[in-house]
Amino acid sequence: MLLVGLAFAVASALVTDVGFLMRQRGATAAPDVDIRTPLRTVAGLFRQKWWTLGYGVALVAWLLHVVSLSLAPLSLVQATLASGFVMLAVIAERCFGFEVGRREWIGILLCAAGLALLGVTAHSTTGTHGSYGLAAAVAFEGGLILCGALALLGHRHPRANGREGPLLAAGAGLLFTVSHVATKALSSHVSVSNPGSLLTPWVLVLVVAFVGAFFASARSLQVGEAVPVIAITSAVSNASAILGGVVVFNDPLGSDALQISLRIFAFALVVIAAAVIPAPVRAAGHRHEERASGHATSPAAA
């Protein structure tokens, strides 16, 4: 059954990548995402066949993930899911026509190695730690929201030229984690027999964070390169969620000095990968200059 569970995990990683790439194709065909007109933006996205199909594929990926968790240990599933970053680059090149450069390949491999190491070293640290300290939860969520807001606002800065997509992707990944932490915290309060238990601030945190992540992720797919944006969103979300388990829900960082060191090293690999994956600013600047000069010299463009 273990091999079957890991096979479902591989399938989940593969389907997740396909769904993300399909949504990227739909997002680029949709009108610009504008948080000031949320209903119009959502309608514009879901009018695109690729975006709607991509969300359906994402649901299938989630179901495959649930099955894999029921058949294999969480740590092994986490390590297996890290292979999705490598498959992302291959699928993007072979099936969707994207070009993945050496810099992106290095970042993707570093990220896959870091997440796989986090999964492998979690074999004795993963448990059902449902309790949490309110102060730690508020501080951690507040820190994520602050960092996410800085990333979302930073993409408009003139010096962010060429990195708008990665910054939006990082912000989306952090906000997705905010919603995940809120969901886990909410699960310890909600009772099926008591609908009034839903009257908690965690519901508001969950909804606002998910909505913000939805719009940020959609916009990142419109303005950024597909592979870097998808990889950064997933890497930041996965790594920050694991960190949230340690900080908020008292998951142990490790059982001995070696394991703690390896997990800290794994976190460092993911952070380095997120910095390496985006295309160089200089190259992006040259592309913008070429487009501008092309528009300036072309009567048809004018």
Image (spheres, rainbow, N blue to C red):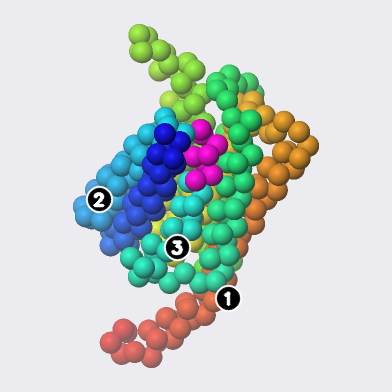
Q: Amino acid under label 1?
A: Arg
Q: Position of residue 192 (x, y in %)?
A: 36, 13
Residue 53: assigned label: 2
Residue 87 visible in the displayed image: yes
**Residue found 25% across the figure and 49% down from its top:** 52
Q: Is residue 183 left or right of residue 11?
A: right
Give the quadrant of the N terminus: top left
Q: Nearer the viewer, mark 2 or mark 3?
A: 3
Above or below, comparing residue 203 to residue 8 in the picture: above
Q: Are marks 2 and 3 in contact (CB under 8 Å)?
A: no
The Cα atoms of the two marked residues, 2 and 1, are separated by 35 Å
Q: Is residue 159 magenta?
A: no
The boundaries of the magenta stretch are 73-80
Q: Is tag 3's residue or tag 1's residue first in the polypeptide sequence?
A: 3
Q: Amino acid under label 2?
A: Leu
Above or below, comparing residue 266 to residue 27 in the picture: above
Q: Residues within 10 Å of mark 1 (few under 14, many from 20)?
A: few
Above or below, comparing residue 256 to residue 299 in the picture: above
Query: SS of the residue at dot 3?
Result: helix
**Residue found 64% across the figure and 39% down from its top:** 121
The Cα atoms of the two marked residues, 3 and 1, are separated by 23 Å
Q: Are marks 2 and 1 in contact (CB under 8 Å)?
A: no
Work out whether residue 282 or residue 235 is closer to the camera in this orientation and state it: 235
**Residue found 38% across the figure and 42% down from its top:** 8
Q: Kindly identify which residue carries mark 3.
A: 89
Query: SS of the residue at dot 1?
Result: helix
**Residue found 78% across the figure and 37% down from its top:** 257
Q: Amino acid under label 3?
A: Ala
Q: Kindly identify which residue carries mark 1.
A: 282
